[in-house]
Image (spheres, rainbow, N blue to C red):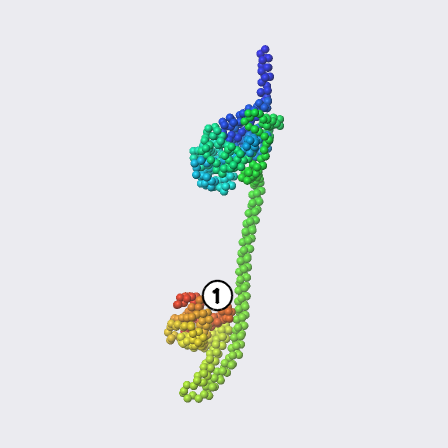
């Protein structure tokens, strides 16, 4: 009898012992206790509707949901569409049904969103009033508790994390509204209808809060963002088709008094598009992980390739350095070649000028000698009665100027024959007063008649003399005086300073000076600052002076009248060269 009773009990208990255990992971938005109370009726309904199977509820937060799926501790999930997209990227969940809500008397699948709450007495009335404040949110990956609110604020022109501080409170989301009520934060991003649910439960007074960026909605709740599909019920790949079908039929069956209404699974395309816009889509994150994994797997190859690239880059840099060096060397060689060509061209022109000067001297010496002879003959034939005779004075001047012309020709021949050779050294020297010579040059140039506005100021002893070849001082003074006057000088200042072996003559003007670029080439032949100049006056003067151990220097300076001008310094020997 005892054995029969035991056998009967085993037969009665065998269905319960054979029933499979199925765990439903539910996103615990408001904590374990509230979630257990809210969703236990659904679990009980499934246990009744699917005989032979046993369902139990497991409240989880976002991280716990991912971990439970990874470890296969749950077989069903009930969560928002954003987390479904993230979980589905690895496990290919099957959506069995989606929640439906009532809106304007009709069922709708759009019920997930965010509301940005502030206290009703807060001074924050626009999005930009949140700058430099603290805004609370549930979790960086929470769909209604952060991501939707983040997009709304970003679209309003704010940069969350930069323009204002973020504070994540985690689950349950109720804590955010308590923090806002206690003024620990200035605003809170919470899921839609959370405030109204807490008000209905008597936890808070919803009249103490208002929505920022409020949007009109058919929902009886405050809304700040667009609405997206409601939560859905999904099965993991390990659930067999028979159980999945039975659960689906149980969810879709409508019974009076059901707390939740279910419909066909809704599309996640809108949610996926939003996640891509926020750079939170699993495919975007997987791409980064894939690249990182590939880099780790091929780090040896990449290291070799990087080393080769570095060597190639170093070789390229070295080649470019060599090319740059050789380019500079080639440019320097080209500059030297151009300078040599210019020097050769100048030498050729100077040689030609020397030949011309020698030819002119040879051809002009005869007529000048004839002029002097005729002038001297006329003077011999004129009676000398001791009285001034205009004709005799004129003929005397003709004879002197012809002699002067001969001296100039001789100086030119000496200049053209060479700069430092012994053959070019002058053999005739005369002593002359510097100031008298300057006055004579001024008169010969007819400066009083041609340039009456130019003044000559002389500071020096009239008795100071120099010993030079004939007419050389007149040539140099005529050249520098004409250059100053032709440059636009209105005043000339001449200063004489006596030294041991030389006499320094300084001629300053107020004609504006010479540009530095032109000053560097002032003594180069055939380069003139005047359009009609030949560029030989200063060159000839320098060679003539250096031929007698004198010199000439030019520099810009401020004239005594305060204007910019040029100062010419002549170093004139006081004794013949053979006595120095």
Q: Quadrant of residue 306?
A: top right
Q: Residue at x 40, y 87 (%)?
A: 386
Q: Is residue 533 left or right of residue 439?
A: right
As helix, strand or loop, the secondary structure at mark 1 comes to: helix
Q: Is residue 575 above or below residue 556?
A: below
Residue 450 in percent (x, y) is at 45, 75
Residue 142 in percent (x, y) is at 51, 34
Which image quarter is the N terminus in? top right
Q: Is residue 452 visible?
A: yes
Q: Nearer the viewer, residue 36 or 455?
A: 36
Which image quarter is the C terminus in? bottom left
Residue 528 in percent (x, y) is at 50, 69
Q: How many marks?
A: 1
Return the residue at label 1: 518
Q: Is residue 385 above or below residue 501?
A: below
Q: Nearer the viewer, residue 57 or 7?
A: 57
């Amino acid at each position: 009898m005892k054995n029969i009773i035991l056998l009967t009990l085993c037969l009665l208990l065998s269905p319960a012992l054979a029933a499979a255990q199925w765990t439903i992971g539910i996103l615990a938005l408001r904590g374990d206790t509230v979630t257990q109370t809210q969703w236990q009726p659904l679990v009980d309904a499934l246990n009744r509707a699917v005989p032979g199977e046993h369902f139990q509820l497991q409240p989880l937060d976002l991280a716990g949901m991912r971990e439970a799926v990874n470890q296969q501790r749950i077989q069903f999930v009930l969560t928002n569409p954003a987390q479904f997209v993230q979980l589905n990227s690895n496990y290919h969940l099957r959506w069995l049904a989606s929640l439906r809500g009532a809106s304007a008397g009709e069922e709708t699948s759009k019920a997930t969103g965010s509301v940005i709450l502030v206290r009703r007495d807060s001074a924050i009335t626009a999005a930009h009033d949140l700058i430099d404040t603290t805004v609370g949110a549930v979790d960086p990956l929470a769909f209604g508790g952060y991501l939707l609110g983040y997009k709304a604020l970003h679209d309003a022109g704010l940069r969350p994390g930069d323009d204002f501080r973020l504070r994540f409170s985690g689950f349950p989301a109720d804590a955010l509204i308590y923090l806002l009520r206690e003024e620990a934060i200035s605003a809170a991003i919470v899921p839609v209808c959370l405030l109204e649910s807490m008000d209905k439960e008597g936890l808070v007074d919803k009249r103490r809060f208002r929505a920022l960026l409020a949007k009109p909605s058919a929902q009886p709740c405050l809304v700040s963002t667009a609405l997206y599909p409601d939560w859905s019920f999904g099965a993991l790949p390990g659930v067999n088709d028979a159980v999945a079908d039975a659960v689906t039929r149980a969810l879709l069956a409508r019974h009076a008094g059901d707390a939740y209404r279910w419909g066909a699974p809704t599309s996640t395309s809108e949610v996926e598009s939003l996640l891509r816009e926020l750079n939170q889509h699993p495919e975007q994150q997987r791409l980064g992980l894939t690249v990182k994994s590939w880099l780790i797997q091929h780090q040896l190859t990449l290291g070799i390739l990087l080393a080769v690239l570095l060597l190639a880059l170093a070789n390229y840099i070295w080649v470019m350095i060599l090319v740059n060096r050789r380019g500079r060397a080639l440019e320097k060689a080209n500059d030297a070649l151009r300078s040599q060509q210019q020097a050769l061209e100048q030498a050729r022109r100077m040689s030609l000028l020397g030949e011309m000067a020698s030819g002119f001297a040879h051809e002009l010496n005869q007529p000048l000698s004839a002029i002097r002879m005729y002038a001297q003959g006329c003077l011999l034939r004129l009676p000398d009665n001791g009285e001034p005779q205009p004709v005799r004075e004129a003929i005397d001047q003709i004879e002197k100027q012809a002699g002067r012309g001969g001296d100039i020709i001789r100086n030119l021949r000496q200049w053209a024959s060479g700069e430092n050779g012994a053959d070019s050294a002058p053999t005739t020297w005369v002593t002359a007063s510097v100031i008298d010579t300057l006055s004579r040059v001024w008169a010969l140039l007819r400066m009083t008649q041609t340039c009456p506005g130019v003044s000559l100021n002389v500071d020096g002893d009239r008795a100071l003399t120099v010993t030079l070849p004939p007419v050389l001082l007149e040539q140099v003074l005529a050249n520098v005086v004409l250059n100053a006057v032709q440059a636009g000088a209105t005043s000339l200042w001449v200063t004489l300073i006596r030294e041991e072996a030389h006499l320094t003559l300084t001629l300053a003007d107020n004609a504006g000076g010479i540009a530095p670029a032109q000053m560097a080439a002032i003594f180069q032949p055939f380069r003139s600052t005047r359009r009609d100049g030949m560029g030989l006056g200063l060159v000839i003067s320098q060679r003539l002076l250096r031929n007698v151990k004198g010199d000439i220097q030019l520099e810009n300076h401020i004239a005594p009248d305060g204007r910019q001008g040029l100062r010419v310094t002549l170093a004139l020997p006081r004794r013949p060269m053979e006595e120095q």
